[in-house]
């Protein structure tokens, strides 16, 4: 049987906008990053930048 581990309170998920920007910053292909940015930033605008 598996082991369940509690996630510490100090490990919170980043807010949506920050997660999107970090993801885009890590992309090496600028054309791909530009394409993804269009869609991901539209999602941030739709759901709100502070969504977790």
Image: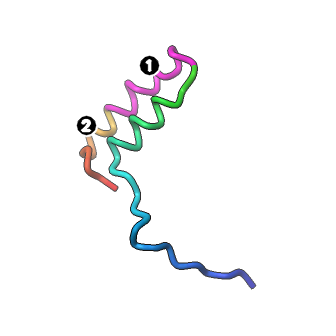
Q: Position of residue 20 (x, y in %)?
A: 40, 38
Q: Residue at x 71, y 81 (%)?
A: 2
Pointer 1 residue? 34
Q: Is residue 10 above or below residue 23?
A: below
* Residue ID at (24%, 45%): 48
User: Taking 3 as reference, is 50 left or right?
Assistant: left
Residue at 54% of width from left, 27% of height from top? Answer: 27
Q: Estimate the spatial distance between the alpha carbons at disc 1 and disc 2, rounded to whole Å.
A: 16 Å
Task: Please name the colour scheme applied to the rendered image.
Answer: rainbow
Q: x, y (%) of residue 15?
A: 33, 50
- Mark 2, Cα crowd under 10 Å, few <14 / some 14-19 / many 20+, is few
State the SS at label 1: helix
The disc, 1 or 2, on the residue closer to the chain's N-terminal end is: 1
Quadrant location of the N terminus?
bottom right
Q: Residue furthest right?
A: 1
**Residue 45, picture quadrant:** top left
Per the image, is 36 magenta?
Answer: yes
Discs 1/2, front:
1
| Element assignment for label 2 | helix
Q: Nearer the viewer, residue 45 or 15?
A: 15
Query: Is residue 8 left or right of 46 when viewed as pictured?
Result: right
Seen in the picture, residue 16 relative to 40 is either above or below; the reply is below
Among the 4 quarters of the image, the one containing residue 22 = top left
Magenta highlight: main SS:
helix
* Residue designated by label 2: 45
Percent of width and height locating residue 7:
49, 73
| The residue stretch that appears in magenta | 29-41
Q: Residues within 10 Å of mark 1 (few under 14, many from 20)?
A: few
In this rendered view, identify the residue nearer to me: 37 or 9: 9
Kindly indicate whether the residue at mark 2 contacts the one at mark 1 (C-beta within 8 angstroms).
Answer: no
Q: Residue furthest top?
A: 31
């Amino acid at each position: 049987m598996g082991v369940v581990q509690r996630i510490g309170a100090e490990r919170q998920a980043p807010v949506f906008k920050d997660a999107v920007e970090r993801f885009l910053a890590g992309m090496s292909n600028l054309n791909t990053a530009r394409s993804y940015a269009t869609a991901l930033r539209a999602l941030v605008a739709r759901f709100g930048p502070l969504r977790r």
